[in-house]
Amino acid sequence: MRLLALIASLIGVLPAHGDSGDDTLKSFLSKSDLVVIGRITAEPIGINDEDGVPNYICRFRIQDVLKGDGKLKDQAIKVNIMRFEMDAKDRQPLIKKDGECILFLKSATPSAPAWVTANFWFGMQHPSPWMARSLKRLATEKSPNPERSGTHSDFFEK
């Protein structure tokens, strides 16, 4: 019984850290100026600049800003969703009118208010509420020691 009480008290004093999966989300966030969840408002226009790299140009209505300028919430922005695709099987099914997704974006040009996906493979993600909450948390989280973020060694070395 004492062992159970000891374990419970230790769990209560350990710092709350994300799991190792947070490292992946932190990487996505670090490459992005703006991370949003929302919906594509019109059928995207597909343009192929080079073989295997289509650009889907569309308007995107932001439901929530997970990282970046919060003033963009409930606004429509112009986005360029860039992907690697060799055939129809590679096409992301969310790239369509009313497709809801999370976009990891960077500014396309300093002079135009347009955005481009920050990564060809992972710039567009399924609209997972859990992922959205985690991204928002990680975007605002300040780690006391970035080299050891997410480990319990911080606690024991203090």
Image: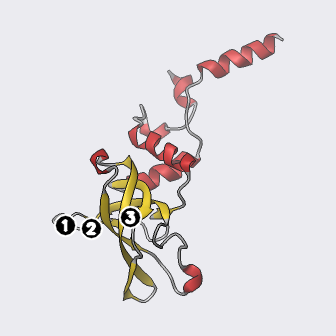
**Contact (Cβ within 8 Å) of mark 1 with mark 2:** yes
Q: Is residue 60 above or below residue 48?
A: above
Query: Where is the N terminus found, in terms of image quarters?
Result: top right
Q: Is residue 141 above or below residue 26?
A: above
Label 3 is placed on what type of residue? Ala
- Where in the figure is residue 107, as x and y percent of width and height? 27, 62
Choose the circle earlier in sequence order: 2 or 3.
2
Residue plotted at (44% across, 64% down): 123
User: Does residue 119 appear anywhere in the picture?
Assistant: yes
Which of labels 3 and 1 is toward the front? 1
Q: Is residue 137 above or below residue 86?
A: above
Label 1 is placed on what type of residue? Ala
Residue plotted at (66% across, 18% down): 10
- Where in the figure is residue 80, as x and y percent of width and height? 35, 72
Find disc 2 in the rendering and name its residue: 108
Front residue of this view, candidates 102 and 118: 102
Find disc 1 in the rendering and name its residue: 112
Find disc 3 in the rendering and name its residue: 118
* Element marked by disc 3: loop
Quarter of the image holding residue 108?
A: bottom left
For this orientation, the residue located farthest to the right is 1
Label 1 environment density (alpha carbons within 10 Å; few <14, some 14–19, many ≥20)? few
